Amino acid sequence: MLTMLIIGVVLPAAPLFVADTIPYEPAEASAKLYSEDASRTVNGVIVDTRTVKLADGVTFMQMDVDTGQGTVSVHLGPAWYMDEHHDRFDVNKGRSVSVIGSPATVDGQEVVVAAELSNGDGTQRMRLRHPKGTPAWVGGEHAK
């Protein structure tokens, strides 16, 4: 004798919406950190690297660059992205670096938000943001 169990599922008439307690920050908000109009070039030697955890919980890499006239903090990209593409650009202490970026405030600190990095002899180059500020880690381009 075969016994069958049939389970009925009742679906709600309308979808249920759940309020998110943490607002979603789209790529456009991140793009606002960089301003092509305010961009400048910072040249120097990397003296320190670190990660910072932003309010949304994402960990970003930053580096300090000694320009010979002072130290500039440079905001790079998400730690996972920088790790994934370390072969494109090494952010090792003691390396000469040229940064194209624009000033901004990130996590309460004045920084230069990097759009492009290159090393002293130009053999390594990494784009982090497009001219309008869109991060390279969103969309189809990855560290070209």
Image: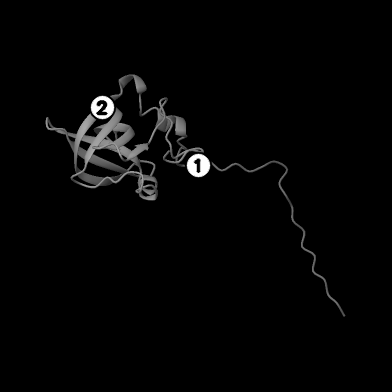
Query: Residue 52 location in percent, x, y?
Result: 29, 44
Residue 69's mark? none
The quarter in which the N terminus is drawn is: bottom right
Relative placement, left or right, of 142 versus 67 is right
- Residue 65 position within the rendered picture, expressed as x and y whole percent measured from the top left: 20, 37
Q: Marks 1 and 2: which is nearer the front?
A: 2
Q: Which residue is drawn at the image coordinates 46% and 34% (left, top)?
A: 27
Question: SS of the residue at dot 2?
Answer: strand
Is 81 placed above or below 67 here? below
- The one nearer the camera, 26 or 122, is 122
**Viewer-proximal residue, 98 or 111?**
98
Residue beneath label 1, please?
20
Discs 1, 2 touching: Cβ within 8 Å: no
Query: Could you tell me the amino acid type at mark 2?
Result: Thr
Residue type beneath disc 1 = Asp
Q: In what quadrant of the picture does the C terminus appear?
A: top left
Badge 1 crowding class, 10 Å Cα cut-off, few under 14, some 14 to 19, many 20 or more, is few
Residue sitting at the far top: 37
Q: Which percent across, then down, holds residue 45?
A: 18, 39
Q: Residues within 10 Å of mark 2 (few under 14, many from 20)?
A: few
Question: Along the horizontal axis of the image, is 31 left or right of 92?
Answer: right
* Residue wearing tag 2: 41
Q: How many marks?
A: 2
Camera-side residue of 61 and 39: 39
